[in-house]
Amino acid sequence: MAVTGRAALLARIAARYRGCGRFAAHYVAGKLRHDPLTGALLALGAREELGEVADLGCGRGQFAALLLEAGLARSVVGLDVNARLLRQARRALRGLSFQGCVQDLTADPAVPQADTVLLLDVLYQLPTAAQVRLLEAAARSARRQMVIRTADPAQGGRAWLTRLLERAGRRIWPHAGAAVNAQPVGWMIERLRGAGWSVRVAPCWAGTPFGNVLLTARRDGAATGVVQGAWDGTDGAASARWPAVSFRKALPTSWAVFPTAAPNAWAPVAMAVPAVCAPSAMAWPASRAVLPIVCPA
Ligand SMILES: C[S@@+](CC[C@H](N)C(=O)[O-])C[C@H]1O[C@@H](n2cnc3c(N)ncnc32)[C@H](O)[C@@H]1O
């Protein structure tokens, strides 16, 4: 998508959240602008429309809004345990084909049938047994593909920083869950492969200091661009920008997701302290970033 087209799209979505309070509006605008997931989802949808989508742990629904506004999904059912976030999602996505339902995915892992199931930054917030049940339910319900973003505990300094910030922010951060419990990516891949899916994994951290990866699982075995062995930083735009991540770049990015309207004054401190104390963790050399070996099912 052209830069101007993308800017206009993000502005339209941000405008939808104006009625949801200053924090929500700032958060969504910053999140969509700075999170590499935005580009990854737009690229995925450009290759193939996502059809009917189930967004598990949808939060405020900003990624559902992105896909629907961009015309890359036909409809989205969003599930989340947080009724307040869902109210904002329903309000912001009025007029789009979005349905939001309150559901605790730990207690009730039922997943609606959908062409594409999204699990974006939610699995790591659940106890391990609940992650297993939810992955299995998602694998049964997804007709075509699953898109999973998660923190990769194998990403050295990035993983350490991600875990630290998630733990530090748990008490104050409105999107926190019951746990900070990222499972090894290889563990997830094995389960998906066992259920007959092919899986592609790629970094989803560009421009941020975090250790997030994106798993794209396909029922038809077409998860291409499979990463083999050590990550060499050449597969796709996300990784191409990876060596440029530095302390100086990472800090403003981290701040950007904490709008000035943050309800709790400790939020910026929770982000800034580890950033100042561990700058080297943010400049983890590309040569040392290793992703697990992934093979198609
Ligand atoms: C980090 S946010 C991610 C939100 C959204 N997927 C995104 O990527 O912007 C995690 C979301 O998972 C939700 N969540 C955590 N535990 C959950 C559970 N047991 N059942 C349903 N949703 C849950 C939280 O309420 C929160 O909205």
Image: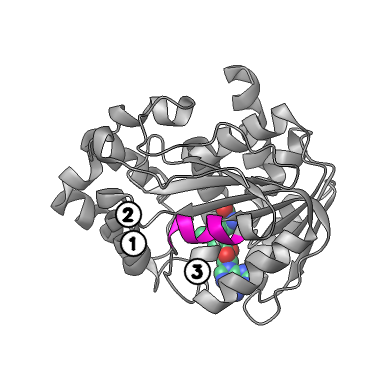
Cα distance, mark 3 to mark 1?
11 Å
In the picture as drawn, the residue positioned furthest to the bottom comes out as 107
**Left or right position of 70 against 260:** right
Residue at 32% over, 49% down: 155
Look at the numbered disc 3 and give the secondary structure of its residue.
Answer: helix
Mark 2 = which residue?
Answer: 159
Dot 3 or dot 1: first in sequence order is: 3
Q: Quadrant of ligand 1?
A: bottom right
Quick check: can you spot residue 8?
A: yes
Beta carbon at label 3 within 8 Å of ligand 1:
yes
The kind of residue tagged 2 is: Ala
Labelled disc at residue 163? 1
Q: Is residue 28 magenta?
A: no
Amino acid type of the residue that numbered disc 1 sits on in the rendered structure: Arg
Q: Residues within 10 Å of mark 3 (few under 14, many from 20)?
A: many
- Answer few, some or many: residues within 10 Å of disc 2's Cα (few below 14, many 20 plus, some between 14 and 19): many
Residue 172 in the image, given as x and y percentages of width and height: 40, 69
Distance between the alpha carbons at the discs numbered 3 and 2: 15 Å
Residue carrying label 3: 125
